[in-house]
Image (cartoon, rainbow, N blue to C red):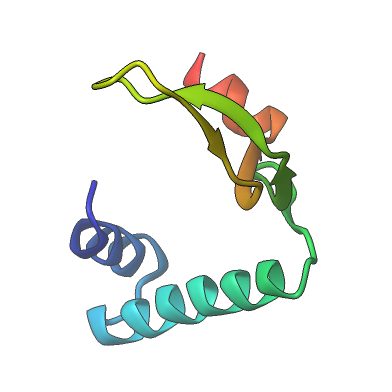
């Protein structure tokens, strides 16, 4: 499902216009992004939790040359699905 299909599904499910569904989805994405940038977690009960985690610096290998390289530390977004989401997928 891509963004346009998700907007269509939100509009149909909530009885909104596509324009209103797009605004709602964009607001959700922006709010979630802003919260994660500030180091907060975003927990949607039943759906899941978004959180920022830090990966430590580690060593790896260049697949073309086989030379050992250092992979720098960085922040990554992690998602942990909620129990309702897990149960519905099973």
In front here: 27 or 55?
Answer: 55
Residue at the image position 29 percent from the left and 58 percent from the top? 6
Residue at the image position 63 percent from the left and 51 percent from the top? 74
Q: Is residue 7 above or below residue 78?
A: below
Coordinates of residue 28 in the picture (x, y in percent): 53, 73
Q: Is residue 88 left or right of residue 74?
A: left
Residue at the image position 74 percent from the left and 48 percent from the top? 45
Coordinates of residue 16 in the picture (x, y in percent): 34, 78
In front here: 70 or 75?
Answer: 70
Residue at the image position 30 percent from the left and 20 percent from the top? 63
**Quarter residue 58 falls in:** top right
Q: Is residue 57 above or below residue 21?
A: above
How many dots with numbers? 0
In front here: 17 or 31?
Answer: 31
Q: Is residue 22 left or right of residue 49?
A: left
**Quarter residue 47 falls in:** top right
């Amino acid at each position: 499902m891509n963004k346009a299909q998700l907007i269509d599904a939100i509009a149909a499910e909530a009885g909104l216009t596509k324009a209103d569904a797009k605004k709602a989805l964009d607001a959700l994405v922006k709010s979630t992004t802003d919260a994660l940038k500030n180091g907060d977690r975003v927990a949607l009960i039943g759906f899941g939790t978004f959180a920022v985690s830090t990966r430590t610096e580690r060593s790896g290998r260049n697949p073309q040359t086989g030379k050992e390289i250092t992979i720098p530390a960085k922040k990554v977004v992690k998602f942990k699905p909620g129990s309702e989401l897990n149960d519905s997928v099973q």
